[in-house]
Amino acid sequence: MGLAEENNVIMLPENGEDVDLSVTDHTFIQPAVLYVGTGGDVVVKLKNGTTHTFKNVPDGYQLAAKVIIVYQSSTATDMVGLW
């Protein structure tokens, strides 16, 4: 998930999934780091069950948190989950 360390080696994400908020909230099959293509507010539920709103996330930003749900109330777009 994002930059993880395994045996003192930094592991980069190997998988990605586009975030689709056109119909409902987006749920990942496993926790993901979130890349935000077009900035705005990002409303997420984290692996630990807490919900947070990240205000004014800039274009091209990588949100380094273990995200499991991205909510439709987010105003940011062009997001990709990476793990």
Image (cartoon, rainbow, N blue to C red):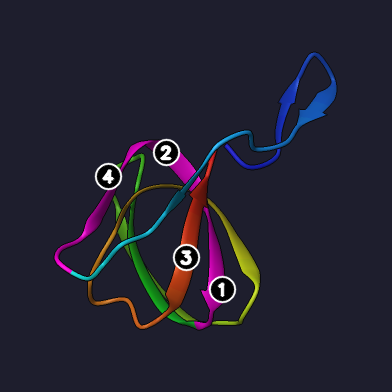
Tell me which numbered mark, 2 or 3, is placed earlier along the sequence: 2
Instruction: For the residues labelled 4 and 2, say whether their Cβ atoms are less than 8 Å apart.
Output: no
Amino acid on which the number 4 mark rests in the picture: Gly
Q: Secondary structure at mark 4?
A: loop
Amino acid on which the number 3 mark rests in the picture: Met
Mark 4 or mark 2, which is nearer to you? 2
Q: For the residues marked 2 and 1, what is the alpha-carbon distance in whole angstroms?
A: 19 Å
Q: In the rendered structure, does residue 2 fall within the stretch colored magenta?
A: no
Q: Is residue 18 above or below residue 48?
A: below
- x, y percent for residue 12: 72, 36
Quadrant in which residue 61 is drawn: bottom right
Instruction: For the residues labelled 2 and 1, say whether their Cβ atoms are less than 8 Å apart.
Output: no
Q: For the residues marked 4 and 2, what is the alpha-carbon distance in whole angstroms?
A: 11 Å
Which stretch did the figure color magenta? 23-39
Label 4 neighbourhood size at 10 Å, few (<14), some (14-19), many (20+)? few
Whether residue 9 sits left or right of residue 79 in the image: it is: right
Residue bearing the label numbered 1: 37
Tell me which numbered mark, 4 or 3, is placed earlier along the sequence: 4
Residue bearing the label numbered 2: 31
Quadrant in which residue 4 is drawn: top right
Instruction: For the residues labelled 1 and 3, say whether their Cβ atoms are less than 8 Å apart.
Output: yes
| Quadrant where the C terminus is found in the figure | top right
Residue at the outermost left position: 23
| Quadrant where the N terminus is found in the figure | top right
Residue bearing the label numbered 4: 49
